[in-house]
Each structure stands twice: as C-alpha cells, then as structure tokens.
Amino acid sequence: MRVLAGPRPDLDDLVQCAAERMIRVLPRFEGRSLLSTFSYGIAYRTLLGHDRWFRRWSRRFAFAEDEHAPEPPNAGESSEEATLRARRSASLHRALAQLSPCKRAVIVLHDLEGMSLKDVACVVDANERTVRSRLRDGRKKLAEILLADPGFDGDEP
Amino acid sequence: MSDQARALRWAREVWRETPPPDREIRLGADRVARRFDVRRPRWTAHKAWVVAGATAAFLGTLAYAGRGTWSEPPPFARKPAPFDHGDSELAVGASRGDAQDVGHGDVGHGDPRNETRDEPAPSEIPSPTAHRAPPDQRMTSPRPATEPTWMDVSDALAAHDHALAEKLLIELTGRDHDANTRAKANLGLAQLDEARQDCEAARKHALQAAAVPDVEIKTVRRALELATRCSR
C-alpha cells in the first residue's frame, strides 16, 4: 500500500482497510497468480476506492489544518544525509502524486518495483497493451514533472 | 541518455534508497493485528469461568470419591473404580456422563443418593470465583494494561467525570487505534464539546470523525448531523 499510495497522512487507514479486505477474501485466492500480485491488486482497488470517496468528501468539506505526517528519521544516519534523502524522496513522491492513479500504479509497480507487465496487468485488472500505453504516457509525464522540479538532481546527459 | 531515461533512472535510485522504515511496518502490523484481536464479550468470559469452576468442582468430587471415601461406587461406574487402568473405557464413559450433568448445572444433585453421602465441605469445593487469577494474569490480550477502553470512558461519563472522559477519548483518537475507534472517539469529543456549548470545537471534532475513511456509516451520519447542528 505504501508503494502505491506513497507517504500520506491516511496511509495507516489505507493499510488497515486493505489488510482487512485481504484477510476477508483470502479464502477465495485460487493460486492463479502470486500471492503478492493478488495482494497488490487488493491494495490498488482499496486505494482507488478511497480516492473516489475522498474526492466526494472534499467537495463538501475541508480540513482546517494540514495534517502531514513527518517521516521518522532513521537512526545511525547523519542529519545532512537524511535531509538530502528526504528532499529527494519528497520530490519523487510529489511528482508521482501528480500522475493519475492508474498511471502512477503502473509506473511504480513496473519501473520502480520491477514487476513484470503481466503481473501489473493482473494487479490493475487491464490488458497488457493498456498497461504499456499507461506506462508510456506515465513515463513521459513523470519526466516532465521531475525535470521541472528543483529537487531533481539527476546526472546531466 | 534521454531526459526520460535520466528521470527514470533517478526515480529508481531514490525509490531504492527510501525503503519503508521498520517502525512504520511494525506499527501498521500492530494496528491490523489489534483490529483482529477478538475480544470476548463479558457474558462469555463469565460463562467460561462458571463452566471452568463447575468442571473443577466435579473433578474435585470425583477425586474425592476415587480415594474410597464413598462406600459404594456411583451407578454408572462398575467395579473396578473409574480411574482403574484396567477399565479405561468405562472411566471415559463415566466422565462423559457426568460432563453432561455439569453442562446442565446439576453438579452433585443429579443423583438423589449422592445427597445422603459425605460430601466435601463447601470450603473444599473449588468455587468459580476462588480460582480466578488476579486481573493481570487472566486471559492474555495484546492490549497494554494502560490503554483506555470504551468501558473506562463509559465509567467516567457515568461518574460525571467529564475531564477524565475527555482525556480517555483524546487517547483513543491516537494514531495507533483503528479508524472506527478514532472516529467514534472524535464523535465522543464532539458530543462533549456540544454539551459544553463549545460549538466551534464540536464542529471540528465532528468533521474529523466524518473524515476518517471506511468507518461505520452510522458514525459518519451522527458526526455530520452534529456538525450541521453546530453550524446553525
């Protein structure tokens, strides 16, 4: 879930919803795919459902204050390294958050997590050609966003 | 290298260097586990203790009888005695027969002949309450002892100790509780605020309760009703 949703204030609730759903539907798992693919699929559908709910909710209400959970620092790491790492990570997650949920999911699962196209297609419940198309559009959009981000410090060509 | 490939390579590097912290995984696992921690209702626990006590009383009586205190064996157990290894089948059958009596709560009264014999003194019969362990040694639960429960909140409210109730509710809104608990705790805080005529705070807490995803719809409805009342 963290992979798909990124660090966000309601991540704990999303994890919990997905875990409950997973435990509920586990007896129906037929073993046609890997258990990890099956659980990614549940996490993906939970995330989409939650985002839909939140869009409806935010049409009527708004939070009075910004509730962003801070990233806990890792022990045994210098503050400079931690800050740099946190800045780069924030840039990446900011860029990923600007993609649509479908494109973000395929980019994260295939390009960042290294999952095969077939498995990604299984997770997002689409055919492989659709996944390829989303991947191509997503990569293009992600590159545009990252190149415009001041936190992006990739090597020059 | 194209811009796209460069961006993708950078994204992969950053992704790899920021794995989820162990603490976050552990907290998430604890929250999920706590949600699935089956809490037995009070009546079940009480019933379990009563049945355990009755069984202990029955076994005590049987052991007492086995020592030859009773002059003749009970009708269901032929010679030799029920715990004689030579007739284990009969002993099992006897235990089963009495276990049914225990289930109906007729320990020691099922057979009228038993009433006339030397029964153990009441102090010797283990009572259901006598064997109770102290509260901290009873059925183990992963819930820490200091963690507030809804029963504590209810007790505090019954004692009109609103300050304590509020403190407990604030603890229940903590991030280590599941979504339903947090939403209900926020709703409780909103109701306390409303009772104190603090509409601004009540509305804020009610909206926080309604904003928690995937909670019971009745909680959301009550929170939104309260928020609407407070915005008039």
Image: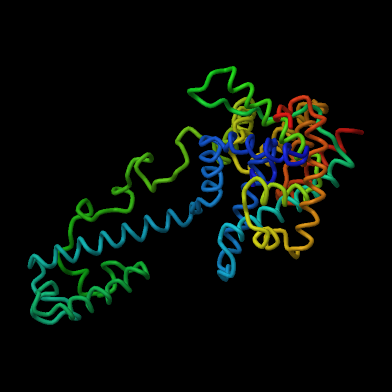
- Report which quarter residue B186 is drawn in: top right
Q: Quadrant of the C terminus of chain B?
A: top right
Toward the viewer: B154 or B143? B143
Q: Quadrant of the N terminus of chain B?
A: top right
Q: How is the image coloured?
A: rainbow
Q: Residue at x 39, y 48 (%)?
A: B139
Q: Residue at x 65, y 40 (%)?
A: B12
The x, y position of residue B136, in whole percent, is: 37, 39
The x, y position of residue B77, in whole percent, is: 16, 79
Answer with left or right where residue B10 lies relative to residue B221.
left
The x, y position of residue A75, in whole percent, is: 50, 24
B4 is higher (above) or lower (below) than A68: below
Q: Residue at x 22, y 63 (%)?
A: B59
B75 is higher (above) or lower (below) than B37: below
A141 is higher (above) or lower (below) than B203: below
Answer with left or right where residue A32 lies relative to residue B116.
right
Q: Residue at x 33, y 58 (%)?
A: B52
The single residue placed furthest to the right in the displayed view is B232
The number of discs equals: 0
The x, y position of residue B36, in whole percent, is: 53, 52
Answer with left or right where residue B8 lies relative to residue B26.
right
